[in-house]
Image (cartoon, grey):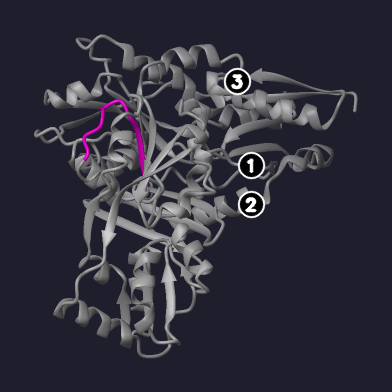
Amino acid sequence: MQRTLRLGTRASLLAMAQSRQIAAQLMNLHPGLEVQLLPVTTRGDRNQSAALSKVDDPDFFSAELDAALLDGEVDFCVHSLKDLPALRHAGIACAALPVRENPRDVIVWRGDVMARLAAGQPLRIGTSSARRQGNIEDFLPAALPATGKAPTLQFAELRGAVDARLARLQTEDASSEALDGVTLALAGLIRLWNDTTAYPRVAELLRGVRWTVLPLSRCPGAAGQGILTIECRTEDGEMLELLRQIHDPATAELAALERSALAQWPAAQRAALGATAILHASLGPVCYVHGVAHGKTIERIVWNQPPSPDSDVVAFNGIAWQRLCKRELATTTLPELAALPADSAVFVAYWHALQDQQLGSALRLWTSGIESWRQLAARGYWIEGCGDHLGFDDLRSTLDCPVLGLPPLQDWTAVTSADAGPGWRNSGIGRVLATYDILPPADSAALRAVKADAARATHCYWSNAEQFHALRAVLPTNAQHACGAGKTRKALHAAGIDAQPFPNGHQWQRWLH
C-alpha cells in the first residue's frame, strides 16, 4: 500500500508518543504506508490555569481536532478515550479502540518522602481530579507507613503535560510549585517510557522516585483510562476499514462496561467516581466503582455473579477455623530474609509472613490485597501495590511494566506460610520463603463449635486451601464451595473441589443475602 495518511494529535509529549505508537502499528501492518503526525493545539492545551473540575466544556480537549478532521486537514485522529464526551459529532466515527494499556493510577513521590513522612511534614499531592482526590484521601492515610504521626495530606491543582507535572517533584521546597507526590495514569507513563523520543526526558524525571500503584478496588481510574480512541470521518469507508484492523473487541467491551456502571449514578456524582473494568481469567469482566461524592463513600463491584441461592442457606466461612490457629515463626528461613539486598523486590502473600520481621525501608514490597497492605503499613512498611485479592497471575502485567523499574520475576522473593509454599512453584517467582507455620488449634470447645458449624453448612467460603483441608472430614458432601480467584481456587481444584470464584469474601456474603 503506497499511501500517506495525516494523523491529527494534540502536541503534548504524551499525545505525540501515543500517536507515534499507533502510526507504527499501522505502518507495520501495511508496508508502504506512511503516517505523518500533524499536531493540533486544543483550547484545553492553551488554557492551563482552569481547574478541570470547574471546566464545563465536553469538547475541551477535542474541538480543534474535530474541526481539522471534518475540514479534511487530517485523515484520522488519536484521542484518549477518557478525554472525549460520550456524544460525538455525527460526521465523526469511532474506527478503533486498540488494545488497552494498564488502567491503574499511580502516585509518583519524591525519593525522600519517607523522611518527610517521619518528620511529620505535610505531603503535598498534585491532582486536578475530584475522583482522585476523594479516593486518595479515603485510602492513603492507612496505606502509608506508620511513623507515630498521622500523615497530613494536602492537595494542589495539577494541569499540563506529564513531564511538566513530574518536574514539580524536583522543584525546591520553598517554591509554591513544589510537590511531594504527583498522581498520574500508569498508562501514560508506560507509553512515554516506550517512546524513543520521550524516554530520555521521562527516565531522568523518574530517577530515584518512590511509587504507590493505587489499588483498582479502592482507587479505580476514570472510565476509559488507558484506552485510545481512533476516529475518522463517518463517510470515509476506506479509512474505517483500514483502522478497524487494530480494533480490540475485548477493550471495547471493558469500556462499555465502565460507562454503563457509571450511568447508574446521577450525572452530578459521576466526576467523583472511578470505574475500571478488567477481564479476569476466572471471573470474566469485573468492574470496580469507587468514589466519595457529597461526603458519602460509594463502592461497588459489577461482575457476572452466579444466581443467588434459591433455598435456605447455612453459611460457613473458613476464617472461623483460622482464627483459632496459632502462627509460629519458621526460624530456618529468617536469616535468608534478613540477608536480602536492600533494594530487593518481595511479594508478601499474607501480612502474617512479615509479622515479626523488621526489614530495610528500601525494599520493593507488594502484597495480595488491601488488608495485608494496611497491616504492613501499620508496621512501618512502604507498600508499592497489591493484587486486589484477584490472585498473583492477574498482577503480572503490572509488575512487568518497565517504567516501574522492578526486577524480573525470577529475581523476586515471595514470603508465605509453609502450607502455601508449594502453590508458588509455577509462579515465575525466583525464590519462595516460608516464614511461618500455621499450627492447627488444639481440641477445645471453640474448635468443636466450629466443626459443628461446618458440618451443617450448605455454602462454604475458603480464603485458603488449608482451611478446607482442616475441615474436609466434617463437611457435608453436597455443600457448595466458593473462594477467591487466585491460588486458593487452583489448590481446591487440585483437591477435587470445583469452587465458585468470587472477587472477595465480602462479595460472597452479599451474594448469599
The residue at which mark 1 appears reads as 99
> Quick one: SS at disc 1?
loop
Q: CA distance from mark 2 to mark 1?
A: 8 Å
The answer to whether mark 2 and mark 1 are in CB contact below 8 A is yes
Q: Amino acid at mark 1?
A: Val
Disc number placed over residue 250 in the picture, else none:
2
- Relative to 285, does residue 132 appear above or below in the rendering? above
Q: Write down the quadrant of residue 509 in the picture.
A: bottom left
Front one among 61 and 104: 104
Q: CA distance from mark 1 to mark 3?
A: 17 Å
Within 10 Å of disc 2 (Cα), the crowding (few <14, some 14-19, many 20+) is some
Q: N-terminal of the two: label 2 or label 3?
A: 3
Range of magenta residues: 357-367
Disc number placed over residue 195 in the picture, else none:
3
Residue 130 among magenta residues: no
Quarter of the figure with the N terminus: top right
Q: Amino acid at mark 3?
A: Asp
